[in-house]
Image (cartoon, helix red, strand yellow):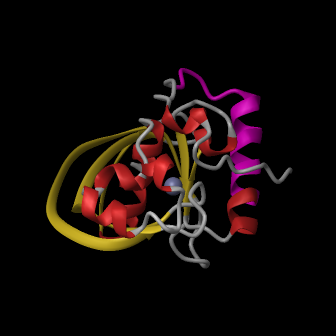
Amino acid sequence: MAILEIKKYPSSILRKRAKKISAITDEILKLTQDMIETLKVAGGVGLAAPQIGSSIRLCIIKPYEEDATLVLLNPKIKSGKGKARMEEGCLSLPGATFNVNRYDEIIVNAMNMEGKMVELKVKELLSRIIQHEVDHLNGVLIFDRVNLLERLKKARTLSPKSIL
Ligand SMILES: [Zn+2]
């Protein structure tokens, strides 16, 4: 296993729409293992493949230390309900956090590592992390989800030019 470099904003790969995965290859299996290791070292709760330089629709989620890592391929949020607002950070935006509004509960369809389609109904933190990671697969970052005033307040932590 290898620890991969996490791409930081404004790396252009973070703004690209990632490609759909058609088959689980050895390369994808290895990449997933490396992502799990990288997330552990980085101390985050989720990681999307574009963040480590691979523009494919793959993400891993691990909300709590004791949990097994959830691996989602081609995840798609089918529906969402309820509203929740919470301070969020991102491994690609070190030092910056934003209050992001998201669905409280979602239904997500994805392929698992066995190549089977699964449907998950999740809420609260797990739901939030999945929404955050699916955003990464679409080239969306947390500051895209906040208003101008909130961005201005945070302009000191990130270069103002880069987030406005
Ligand atoms: Zn992120």
- Measured as percent of width and height from the top left, residue 34 is found at 76, 49
Q: Quadrant of residue 69?
A: bottom right
Regarding residue 110, the answer to whether it shows in the image is yes
User: Residue placed farthest to the right in the image?
Assistant: 1
- Measured as percent of width and height from the top left, residue 119 is found at 33, 46
Q: Nearer the viewer, residue 4 or 66?
A: 4
- Measured as percent of width and height from the top left, residue 108 is found at 31, 47
Q: Residue at x 39, y 66 (%)?
A: 126
- Measured as percent of width and height from the top left, residue 141 is found at 43, 49
Q: Residue at x 70, y 51 (%)?
A: 6
Magenta segment, which residues?
A: 21-37
Main secondary-structure element of the magenta-colored stretch: helix
Q: How many numbered marks, from 0 up?
A: 0
Regarding residue 127, the answer to whether it shows in the image is no
Q: Nearer the viewer, residue 131 or 8?
A: 8
Left or right: 112 in relation to 135 = right
Left or right: 151 in relation to 9 = left
- Residue 24 lies in the magenta stretch: yes
Left or right: 9 in relation to 28 = left
- Residue 151 lies in the magenta stretch: no
Left or right: 143 in relation to 112 = left
